[in-house]
Amino acid sequence: MHIGQNLRVRFIWEKYGWRPLLLFALYDAFIGLLYGPLNIHWLDIPWQPVATLGTAVAFYIGFKSNASYSRFWEARQLWGAVVNSSRTWAGRALDFVRTPDDNYHYDSAELAAHRRLVYRHIAWVNALRLHLRRQTAELWQTDVVPFLLDPADHALGQANNPPAQLVIRQGHDLRRLSFDNMLTEFREVSMAETLRELNNHQGACERIKNTPFPRQYAFFSYVFVMIFALLLPLGLVEEFDHRVALGPYHVWLMVPFATLVSWVFHTIEKVGHNSENPFENLENDVSMSAICRSIEIDLRQMLSETDLPKPLQPVADVLY
Amino acid sequence: MHIGQNLRVRFIWEKYGWRPLLLFALYDAFIGLLYGPLNIHWLDIPWQPVATLGTAVAFYIGFKSNASYSRFWEARQLWGAVVNSSRTWAGRALDFVRTPDDNYHYDSAELAAHRRLVYRHIAWVNALRLHLRRQTAELWQTDVVPFLLDPADHALGQANNPPAQLVIRQGHDLRRLSFDNMLTEFREVSMAETLRELNNHQGACERIKNTPFPRQYAFFSYVFVMIFALLLPLGLVEEFDHRVALGPYHVWLMVPFATLVSWVFHTIEKVGHNSENPFENLENDVSMSAICRSIEIDLRQMLSETDLPKPLQPVADVLY
Amino acid sequence: MHIGQNLRVRFIWEKYGWRPLLLFALYDAFIGLLYGPLNIHWLDIPWQPVATLGTAVAFYIGFKSNASYSRFWEARQLWGAVVNSSRTWAGRALDFVRTPDDNYHYDSAELAAHRRLVYRHIAWVNALRLHLRRQTAELWQTDVVPFLLDPADHALGQANNPPAQLVIRQGHDLRRLSFDNMLTEFREVSMAETLRELNNHQGACERIKNTPFPRQYAFFSYVFVMIFALLLPLGLVEEFDHRVALGPYHVWLMVPFATLVSWVFHTIEKVGHNSENPFENLENDVSMSAICRSIEIDLRQMLSETDLPKPLQPVADVLY
Amino acid sequence: MHIGQNLRVRFIWEKYGWRPLLLFALYDAFIGLLYGPLNIHWLDIPWQPVATLGTAVAFYIGFKSNASYSRFWEARQLWGAVVNSSRTWAGRALDFVRTPDDNYHYDSAELAAHRRLVYRHIAWVNALRLHLRRQTAELWQTDVVPFLLDPADHALGQANNPPAQLVIRQGHDLRRLSFDNMLTEFREVSMAETLRELNNHQGACERIKNTPFPRQYAFFSYVFVMIFALLLPLGLVEEFDHRVALGPYHVWLMVPFATLVSWVFHTIEKVGHNSENPFENLENDVSMSAICRSIEIDLRQMLSETDLPKPLQPVADVLY
Amino acid sequence: MHIGQNLRVRFIWEKYGWRPLLLFALYDAFIGLLYGPLNIHWLDIPWQPVATLGTAVAFYIGFKSNASYSRFWEARQLWGAVVNSSRTWAGRALDFVRTPDDNYHYDSAELAAHRRLVYRHIAWVNALRLHLRRQTAELWQTDVVPFLLDPADHALGQANNPPAQLVIRQGHDLRRLSFDNMLTEFREVSMAETLRELNNHQGACERIKNTPFPRQYAFFSYVFVMIFALLLPLGLVEEFDHRVALGPYHVWLMVPFATLVSWVFHTIEKVGHNSENPFENLENDVSMSAICRSIEIDLRQMLSETDLPKPLQPVADVLY
């Protein structure tokens, strides 16, 4: 996620700028060459259908912008919800899990259970991040295992869906605590509700990850912009040619303007395209790494730990 | 659901391409023939009302694109919710259903009950898929019955609404477990909440299936595009005719451009049309078969089974 | 609700076709008469303000289409939710209402209570339908009373709001069952939650019924389309007149084109208008009768009844 | 809220009609005077930027229409939710509040408690209406106090937020009933959930009331329409002037058409503006008085009262 | 938040007016100078691509207006939800926390607990405000500490996330009260539900604060408006120049009109831009200070306090 006030010029230039600009300029110059010096005048078409096409295409890429932005924003909301549920889970773990004595102060069994439940939750958050970014194989050992205090959980990285299995383990832990009389039935069901929320957040993230913006919408959006860019110089060339301020050279003035208008349409399409998939480890991603770290800090502070890691910092204005 | 990065050219050509292109080209050529060689000049109409019509039609098909996409996306969200509720159901079955002893380890009665509840849930997921695709009659035996461990459930394929009756059976099973002291009242109600969720997901899918995008909206969207395509060459023909680069042949240049613009409008309409109904076993469907398989794998892994089926693979870039 | 793949031509013609087409044709011909034969040339106005007006009006009727469709879809969602809650209610009635013995099999007191609660629910669904369609007076005896097994409920047809009073009766029945030790406190509250849902569904339907699409929006949408249709031939007439292919008769060509464009705008407005009110017993309605029947079938099948009615069939492609 | 099928002509004329029409006509005539008789020809500007401006302004007022309508509709949904929660509250009061005997029939303590809880709720509904319309000072005695059976509540009209304090009193009453063994803990918490809903409905109404549609959006929407109306005759005047059917008088034809187009844009803006604030006791309001009365009737019928007030009737097609 | 009926002229002028107006006027005059007096006629480009560009840009800034407004409105909804949850929290604290005697009247232990829980909640509301506005360091002592009756809480201002830690403390207080037999298990879980809501509200506010409107959308929206403003005079200059009413000076008339149209587009963009971030302590903010004060007044009135602060007043029509 970009966090700078503005995008960096170089980033724009590399990501949105030179390639399409060059492409459109070459094509538009080619048309100018045919029409002007080479005098192939039947290339000229009336402007009106180009304008009507432009309106329809503007609608379509506007619709795509909207839908892509909604995908990004839903993804961000889901990770916001992960933050909220994390705090709720930690709070309930600390307050609801109790040894059946009359002593308010935490004893060692309570402290161990609290720590195990909260750390496994931090593991889940990181496992979900790896799962969505398809990095489980490389990073499970370094990013998840350190938070799995129960060695029996370490092997879950091999499962079809590691974070889903971790939620199941949390449920089994609650069941165990209830057998051990550290969790009453009512409080157990209340914590199981939070597990239900975690399942919902995870499933919704997977849905966005696994269901791309429907290909037919995405594909034609691109095709229509290209058709518009193809017709644009044909519609403009005669308008420029009949002006005479620059004599026979006037037709070349069409090139920068056609290029610019094509580029605007193309960029609108591309901005939408780049926001479609928010879990790809790219610069438009939801900053899952930073959110995971922030959850870790808050939850460990709730456990009264003081040796905490630092928040992640952006790299070249991008927070991952 | 298409999952390739782009649609295949052949798919586009067959599904969106040659038929409307041919149709529009023939019609536009016919107008060119009348106006040019046959000299029927009263066919020419001013461009302005065509442009205004084009704007209004662009609005209308934009609205339809939006609504169709929303239908698809809601359908996908519902199956995402089915995934989530499946995990929650399995988790609760494993944790909440207990024989009333003090032993934390699963005994055989627990294992049998867990397996029955989880397998019947996998049966429900598949039954819902068949119900939405109207395939219950053909596929009930192969796709649902293997997961129905209780033979009394096998006959439900005859019911008016098999998946709804399966949810009822899950409830009866909970009731039975509560009579057998394997499920406390509070935990039973909590699992009944998950059954409520399943009812909601199923009912919402049926709503989308049974209520097509309102026919009046869909019908006129198509009619308006066709009216626009009919008027388009009439508005353009004179503009091309009065250009002279190609002499009397210039009028024929109108044909490719009118065809292209008509095709863009037609395709926007058609893309929307093809996304309207997400449960038809077509290539734009929600990939219910793959989701059912994925649920089966995850849930059986939660039961500690190891002999698991493989995820479904896409066929020609389409996942069903 | 229309359920055919396409609307019937005759339906279109009667509902959307001949009246506005005739009206616009007459008006446009009148303008043609004044301008052409009668030579009243000051009638001609420039096209530009008409085009700008057309864009603004297209926006406005697009907005109205959207809002009207949302009203229809919300209404349909609500009846989908009624279906879901019906299944949940029946499931809970069957599972939660128990005589306080250790016998899992239904005894006669249980069967009677289950049937009473489920039938009264079917009565509520039908009463809500009658209430929304303002048919309580005529159809209460035939459509609701047969499902009211407790004669004390029959008189509720006289109440200000019969379905709301039926929900109250369901609550009183739960209270009675709890006094009779057939419903534990916790299960009673859980069923009262479902009654809360029913109240919410009913109230939301009443809101849509009682609050028309705000009159100021609806009224001006119609007025603006009419203003556009009034100005349209004035803006077009000169364009057609200065063409000469048909000599003095050319001006009459304006009539069919102006009529067609007016009709498209008018139809967009009208399609929205016809979808605004989804509970009017018209052909664009939510098909409440069919839904009620379908609920009856499913719920009675849950009671293990076998003598079930048939689903409602569409009449001339319309399901009511 | 308007409830007639159409708005009354006189209402339109007074509210939307003569003032802006007169204003625009005077301004447009003034431009006509300068350009025509006074021959100040430099006033004429090309039409193109006016058209582009018109498109942008159409977008902006379309956006505002949408947002204003959403505000109205959310307000109406909230009062629909108030209706639903009212029925749920009354149902729970009647069913859950019980003296701890085995007698199903209501005894006098029960009847008194039910009536107190239900009447205080009717008081809350009316107090909320007065609070939103800023009428607490004038109408508290007549519209709220009659429903406050406990004299200690009468003074709450002086509080900073009377309806919020009434909800607190309902909670205290539940607490008291639980001390008196008339409400079990579990049922008390369930009723407290309904109080939470009431808080949510009330707070959402206050949010809409206290947060106007952001002033910057509203202000510029008006300004842009005015700028468009200012430029419109300048762009049109030459087009009309160069037509000659009426000789030098032709320029005056610009006046009615410019006025009409300006008025359409202005009216779209104004319709949105008038729907922005749904709690102002004006004719576009949510009909809170009628809803309050309807709640009173239904709830008192639930208490088996028969001496009920009549529903409120619309005044000049407007229901308040 | 602006609360005046209209924005103040001076505010408009300073915030939206003179800078862009001056900039556009200078640029447009520069083009006029080149084209007119300096006779550089090749600067003139046809209007058509400018119009098409204008339509596409209008779409894009319309989309941005919508998204920005949604951000503001979601932020406002969240603080409305904070108000609602505050009332619910206070109501539950007062009703649910009880010493285990049979005496309905509040005793001193109850009064102390109620006050501690409600005051800590007021502290949380203010801490959240400071956290979102990044003012914790300066204002913690004056705005939060006075409401922290338990001195152990004072140090939380040093935490990574003070309001999140305050919610944890509320949970610990509930745990303590349950050990002290002042809160039953069921009521404790019900209050923990409200803490869950508070976590959700806080997390959603943080999400809006920490995730700016995606930079690529925001950046290109500005760039496109600027490109449009750059091309606008080039497209208009010839149209004005060929008019002759003012002779060679006529070209200068282009300047005010081009400036005005550029300014409208720029202002639409800027209004959206200014609403993007609702927690910045600027004049378009959600009025969090006023809401905090209003919560304080209502909650202390619920505690029967009478020495209450006054509501915050707007400063120059802006409520902070």
Image: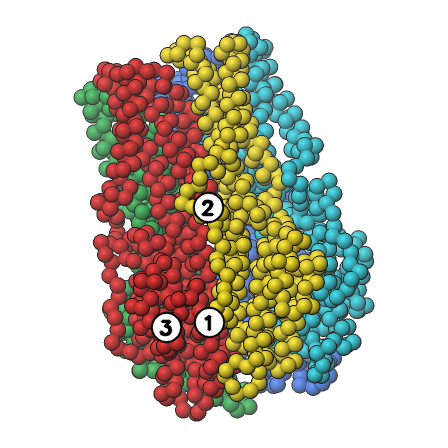
Chain colours: A cyan, B blue, C green, D red, E yellow
Q: Which mark is residue A61?
A: none
Which residue position holds label 2? E317
Mark 1: give few (<14), some (14-19) or many (20+) Cα within 10 Å: many
Q: Quick check: C213 left or right of A315?
A: left
Local secondary structure at mark 2: loop
Query: From the viewer's perspective, is the residue at label 3 or at label 1 nearer?
Result: 3
Q: Nearer the viewer, residue B204 or A283?
A: A283
Where is residue C129 drawn, in percent x and y? 34, 66
Label 1 marks a residue whose chain is D
Residue C287, above or below B246: below
Image quadrant assignment for residue D167: bottom left
The residue under label 3 is: D154
Q: Quadrant of residue D65?
A: top left
Q: Are marks 3 and 1 on the same chain?
A: yes
Q: Residue at x 50, y 82 (%)?
A: E105
Callout 3 touching callout 1 (CB < 8 Å): no
Q: The disc numbered 3 marks a residue on which chain?
A: D
Of residues A71 and E126, the one drawn nearer to the viewer in this rendering: E126
**Does residue D69 appear left or right of residue A124 in this picture?**
left
The amino acid type found where label 3 is placed reads His
Q: Residue at x 66, y 37 (%)?
A: A7
Residue type marked 1: Ile
Q: Nearer the viewer, mark 1 or mark 2?
A: 2
Q: Chain of mark 2?
A: E
- The residue identified by callout 1 is D168
Q: Residue furthest top?
A: A247
Residue C102 place in picture, x, y as percent? 55, 90
